[in-house]
Image (cartoon, rainbow, N blue to C red):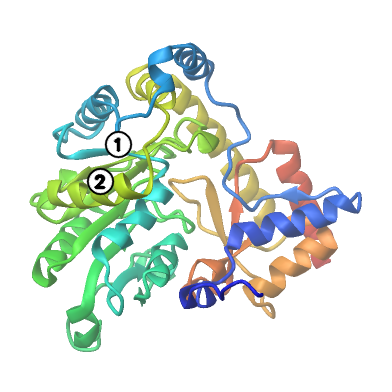
């Protein structure tokens, strides 16, 4: 007897980009080859000590050994609301306008279950986090990719005029995803862009989802805004946050959603049926991260800015010129002439033993670009560029 064939939607789901990268890295390391990975945005620094110490104490609290509150503890959601007000001047109700997530990736994926029917569309950046479109595929739905161009600052274009998004797509669209600071391009968006997105979603009865996972990583004095700062945003918008990059907590899997209460309720209903919430001890540690000293973020931004400048100078010396990002932990660089993104990344891996991610893995308009992660110590960053120089020579 053979097992049943998996659901057809899995046939339409491409292999997850970062899982493929991990597999190639591991295969080379098993051969004894030293591989430098500039691929995945996983901070090389540990979680700050004061957060770890809080977690250690919270684990020992027997009250935390039971099932957590589905929506997140009220203490955690209150800390989120206080942080939103302190950081952005935005007020959200901790009971009805905040929701704990097992990382923002989980929340984004479950949003499709909450709002998208088979045959519907989501509107997603043509260069963006793969889960925006992957979640739609898992719901037997479609993704319409919004054009992104270097000359317009990598802002996803959601034009509903002649030559823009087809009317038949807009009629079946349910969600508009955007995310600035942007992964992978490092682009930032002006306030007017958010105003346009809010107005667009109101015209077409869409949920606006702003992925703000990189809001705390800024350079040269830049501090990212919240879409909820803009007038009328809460009528249509949900904003997703993660503690992964801001506090070096990628493995902890903790984030939150804030915004429109009906959207929060719908997402919460899905989560009530599909997961049992995040371990309360992790929420306790996250409370301290949000409400405690923030100098760890300042130090981290200084470090990433230093690494950004180091990489840009080194790349320029070998003829690869790219714009200096003002946010995120990535450098978005153009592939040398004569290569596709996949060809160049494969060549780097097999000949220089350096891993970067191909821009094409983030969507159709990422072709011709690569993403370089800054989550690697200085000496390895410089060694990686030295190897790339040798390969190109």
Q: Residue at x 76, y 63 (%)?
A: 348
Residue 221's label in the rendered image is none
Which residue is depicted at the point 84% across and 56% down?
28
User: For this view, does 268 lie left or right of residue 347?
Assistant: left
* Residue 389 placement, left or right of 37: right
Residue 334 spot, x, y in % from top left = 59, 67
User: Quick one: 39 or 192, which is closer to the camera?
Assistant: 39
**Between residues 386 and 258, which one lies in front from this camera angle?**
258
Q: Which residue is disc 1 drawn over?
A: 70
Determine which residue is flagged by label 2. Answer: 268
The extreme front residue here reads 1
The answer to whether the residues at label 2 and label 1 have Cβ atoms under 8 Å apart is yes
User: Which element type, helix, strand or loop, lies under badge 1?
Assistant: loop
Counting every numbered tag in the picture gives 2
Percent across and percent down for residue 109 are: 38, 57
Secondary element at image label 2: helix
Q: Quarter of the image holding residue 204?
A: bottom left
Horizontal relation, residue 332 to residue 153: left or right: right
Foreground pick, 1 / 215: 1
Residue 317 in sight in this render: no
From the viewer's perspective, is residue 194 above or below residue 299? below
In 3D space, how far apart are the residues under numbered discs 2 and 1 (Cα atoms)? Answer: 8 Å
**Residue 94 position within the rendered picture, expressed as x and y whole percent measured from the top left:** 18, 31
Q: Does residue 272 appear in the picture of this structure?
A: yes
Residue at horizontal 13 percent and vertical 33 percent from the top: 93
The quadrant the N terminus occupies is: bottom right
């Amino acid at each position: 007897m053979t097992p049943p064939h998996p659901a057809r939607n899995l046939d339409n789901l491409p292999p997850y980009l970062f899982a493929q990268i991990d597999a190639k890295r591991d295969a080379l390391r098993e051969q004894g080859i030293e591989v430098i990975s500039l691929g995945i945005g996983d901070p090389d620094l540990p979680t700050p000590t004061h957060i770890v110490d809080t977690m250690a104490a919270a684990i020992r609290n027997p009250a935390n050994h039971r099932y957590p509150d589905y929506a997140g503890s009220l203490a955690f959601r209150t800390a989120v609301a206080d942080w939103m007000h302190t950081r952005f001047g935005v007020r959200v109700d901790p009971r009805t306008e905040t929701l704990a997530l097992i990382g923002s990736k989980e929340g984004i994926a479950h949003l499709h279950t909450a709002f998208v029917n088979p045959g519907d569309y989501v509107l997603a950046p043509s260069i963006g986090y793969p889960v925006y479109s992957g979640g739609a595929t898992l719901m037997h739905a479609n993704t319409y990719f919004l054009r992104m161009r270097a000359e317009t600052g990598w802002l996803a274009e959601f034009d509903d005029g002649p030559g823009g998004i087809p009317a038949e797509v807009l009629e079946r669209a349910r969600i508009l995803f955007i995310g600035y600071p942007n992964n992978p391009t490092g682009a930032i968006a002006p306030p007017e862009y958010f105003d346009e997105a809010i107005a667009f979603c109101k015209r077409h009865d869409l949920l606006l989802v702003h992925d703000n996972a990189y809001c705390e990583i800024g350079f040269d004095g830049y501090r990212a805004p919240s879409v909820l700062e803009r007038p009328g945003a809460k009528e249509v918008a949900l904003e997703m946050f993660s503690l992964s990059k801001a506090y070096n907590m990628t493995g902890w899997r903790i984030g939150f959603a804030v915004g429109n209460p009906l959207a929060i309720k719908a997402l919460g209903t899905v989560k009530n049926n599909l997961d049992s919430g995040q371990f309360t001890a992790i929420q306790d540690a996250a409370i301290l991260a949000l409400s405690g000293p923030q100098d760890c973020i300042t130090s981290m931004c200084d470090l990433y800015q230093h690494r950004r400048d180091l990489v840009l100078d080194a790349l320029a010396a070998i003829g690869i010129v790219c714009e200096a990002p003002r946010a995120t932990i990535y450098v978005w660089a153009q592939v040398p002439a004569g290569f596709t993104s996949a060809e160049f990344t494969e060549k780097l891996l097999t000949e220089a033993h350096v891993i970067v991610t191909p821009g094409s893995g983030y969507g159709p308009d990422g072709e011709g670009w690569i993403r370089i992660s800054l989550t690697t110590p200085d000496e390895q960053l410089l060694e990686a560029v030295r190897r790339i120089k040798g390969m190109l020579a």
